[in-house]
Image (cartoon, rainbow, N blue to C red):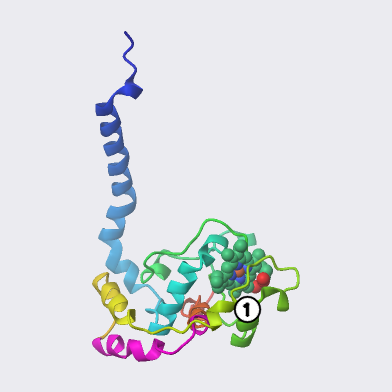
Amino acid sequence: MSKDFTHSLVILIIVTLVVASFSLVVWVVPNIVRGDDIAKGSLAKPFTAIELAGRDIYISEGCHVCHTQMVRPLDPEVKRNGRPNQESDDIYEFPNLWGSKRTGPDLTNLARKYSDQWHVLHLVDPRQVVPTSIMPAYPWLFEQILSGDDISAKMETLRTLGVPYTDEEIGDARLQVRGKTKGEALIRYLQSLGKDTSQEVSP
Ligand code: HEC
């Protein structure tokens, strides 16, 4: 009769608990303890209502599957993509969109690289501006209109997670978003990427 430990449920549970507690101690606890310090040193500002609506479209269209938002502090990365990420940049990101696969370029510091008009052409059909592009076209983004009905509720939820939205910002949110196309909101989000952190004087 063999006593193979891989068949023991008790050992499986114990080992899972050990691994989970280790992750908790290494990843979660330091952030809870240092949370306020990280927030104090941060240049990040909360997304406006329209940027937030655009961010949701970025997620729902799966842009993060091909694009990272994570510049590592390595020379070739910084030369290509600009300022490396710092943990304090992401205090208002729920969830973070670091990504793990770069079919397209990293978008961390995208703001101001292109005009709004370039983004419209690129999203409607990337081949109009980059003939060899393999990025999919998203023409419907400029046909579908946002109602803005759920944006205040989203901002309230983010406030419970620590994003400092005022009652006024939440109250005005629906009007900011209502009637805009999905594409317009997405471009506001794209033009916000790296805008706040670019004010930092580079070393
Ligand atoms: C199948 C992978 C893929 C998906 C999905 C995708 N992209 Fe791209 N993207 C690319 C590739 C490849 C490029 C480089 C060629 C080009 O500029 O079109 C690119 C380029 C870009 C650029 C220009 C970046 C620069 O620095 O020049 C932007 C902005 C962009 N994509 C935004 C988006 C947005 C927004 C979405 C979602 C609506 C999206 N992408 C979805 C692959 C993808």
Magenta stretch: dominant secondary structure: helix
Residue 42, by quadrant, is bottom left
Residue density around tag 1, few if under 14, some if 14–19, many if 20 or more, within 10 Å: some
Q: Which quadrant is the C terminus positioned in?
A: bottom right
Whether 34 is drawn above or below 21: the answer is: below
Q: Which quadrant is the N terminus positioned in?
A: top left
Q: Which residue is under mark 1?
A: 124
Residue 113 position, x and y percent, is 61, 80
Whether 103 is drawn above or below 142: the answer is: above
Residue type pointed to by label 1 = Val
Q: Label 1: state its secondary structure.
A: helix
- Is any part of residue 174 visible from this angle? yes
Name the residue rendered at 30%, 54% in the picture: 28
Going by the image, does 127 lie left or right of 178? right
Name the residue rendered at 30%, 68% in the picture: 37
Residue 92 position, x and y percent, is 36, 72
- Is any part of residue 129 visible from this angle? no
Going by the image, does 170 lie left or right of 183? left
Whether 81 is drawn above or below 19: the answer is: below
Residue 105 on the magenta span: no
Residue 55 position, x and y percent, is 45, 74
Ligand 1 sits in which quadrant?
A: bottom right
Whether 129 is drawn above or below 64: the answer is: below
Foreground residue among 4 and 26: 4
Residue 73, by quadrant, is bottom right
The residue lying furthest to the top in this view is 1
Residue 169 on the magenta span: yes
Residue 197 position, x and y percent, is 47, 76
Name the residue rendered at 27%, 28% in the picture: 9
Foreground residue among 197 and 118: 118
Name the residue rendered at 38%, 64% in the picture: 95
Q: Which residues are magenta?
A: 167-184
